[in-house]
Amino acid sequence: MKILLIGEYSRLHNSLKEGLEAIGHHVTIIASGDYFKNYPADIKLHRSFDKGLGRKIKIAIYKLFKKDITSVLLIKQAFRYKNLLKNHDVVQLINERALGAQPKDEQKFIHFLKEHNSKLFLLCCGTDYLSVKYAYDKNFRYSILTPFFKGKVNPKEYNNVLSYIKPTYLNHHQFVYKNIQGVIASDIDYHLPMKDHPKYLGLIPNPINTDKISYIENPVNDKIIIFHGINKANFYKKGNDLFEKALKVIQEKYSDKVEIIVTENVPYNEYINLYNKAHILLDQIYAYDQGYNALEAMAKGKVVFTGAEKEFLDYYGLNENEVCINALPNVNDLVKKLSWLIENPEKITEIGENARKFVIEKHHYINSAQEYLNLWTKQPK
């Protein structure tokens, strides 16, 4: 099959491509790399007017003409490759705004893809209309909107997330769903909002290329190393403020037993190497399941504080603390769980080994790729 993957912001599509190619299919990724993370793509698009003077010019143009010049130029750039974007058996969008353009510009691109390829599918693996609406209606016990509900942040900081449930975006959501054969969720956080939708095809676990990620033997001989990587744009949405408070307590309580490493806004390739010597990685709090960064760290044998709620444990038939640590939005709970690991270092090795086995068994990139193929081929044109 000839397959086109649109967009990338977690390495999901790159790992899926590697799995599909391993079983004999031809795959192309077109994406812009997701800002500073700089993920690879076969057709790499470049965003402009996002920083400094360029951003000020963009804002001025938008105020005068109601046009987002970054969005317009991004789609114009994508259309330069239109001959490479035709005649695929399957096209998959990583999000309702797969290239990160404005809805009206993204719709021109989606219309082209629909017209010139056989089947069009959508992934639910990030903020979109249904997932944000589900969180906004407080159907989750907690979510990325919890800091907003609690008044922790300036509401303006959530404009980007809340824009997904505004009428203009609802129209875009409806346009996308009218044009796709079906939608696939990547984990429990997106499965729950999607599960009763008529176009929902099911959950396929994030594909992780464990052939490229080695298990790292890292026994606790001296200090326990805790890694906390921060994306400043998502500081409160990921619960980094709570991790910071918990780490402050841990540093004071176990200064002779721990080493804490903190980074900010590090490109993907640098980020995944920075935590290699760590025993524990703090990923995110407001989640029920693991995202891509957490799974890659688990594949290396790290103990990851991330989403591991009852819904996740039940889905995979796991016990609490078996493959990772459920990071609840509670500083005292985080301190308690970190303290337990520090005082029982043998658990770090045990959970790390279990984590590696779990990722290989449930998230292996070739198995996931085959699951995608099974769903894609079942759907009529």
Image (cartoon, helix red, strand yellow):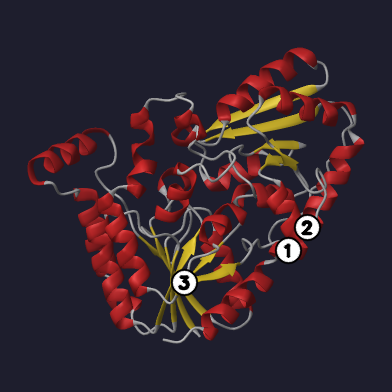
Which label belongs to residue 199?
3
Q: Residue at x 80, y 54 (%)?
A: 318
Residues packed near mark 1 inside 10 Å, few (<14), some (14 to 19) or many (20 plus)? some
Nearer the camera: disc 2 or disc 3: 3
Please name the amino acid that badge 3 sits on. Answer: Lys
- Secondary structure of residue under mark 1: helix
Please name the amino acid that badge 2 sits on. Answer: Phe
Q: CA distance from mark 2 to mark 3?
A: 29 Å
What residue did someone put label 2 on? Answer: 358
Please name the amino acid that badge 1 sits on. Answer: Lys
Q: Is residue 38 visible?
A: no
Q: Residue at x 72, y 41 (%)?
A: 304
- Secondary structure of residue under mark 3: loop
* Residues at circles 1 and 2 in contact by the CB criterion of under 8 Å: yes
The image shows residue 190, relative to residue 232, as above or below, that is below
Q: Is residue 300 left or right of residue 78?
A: right
- Looking at the image, which is closer to me, 224 or 312? 312
Q: Is residue 312 visible?
A: yes
Which label belongs to residue 362?
1
Q: Residue at x 52, y 56 (%)?
A: 193
- Secondary structure of residue under mark 2: helix
Q: Residue at x 63, y 63 (%)?
A: 207
Which label belongs to residue 293?
none
Q: Provide residue 228's location: percent of width, then percent of height.
A: 63, 32
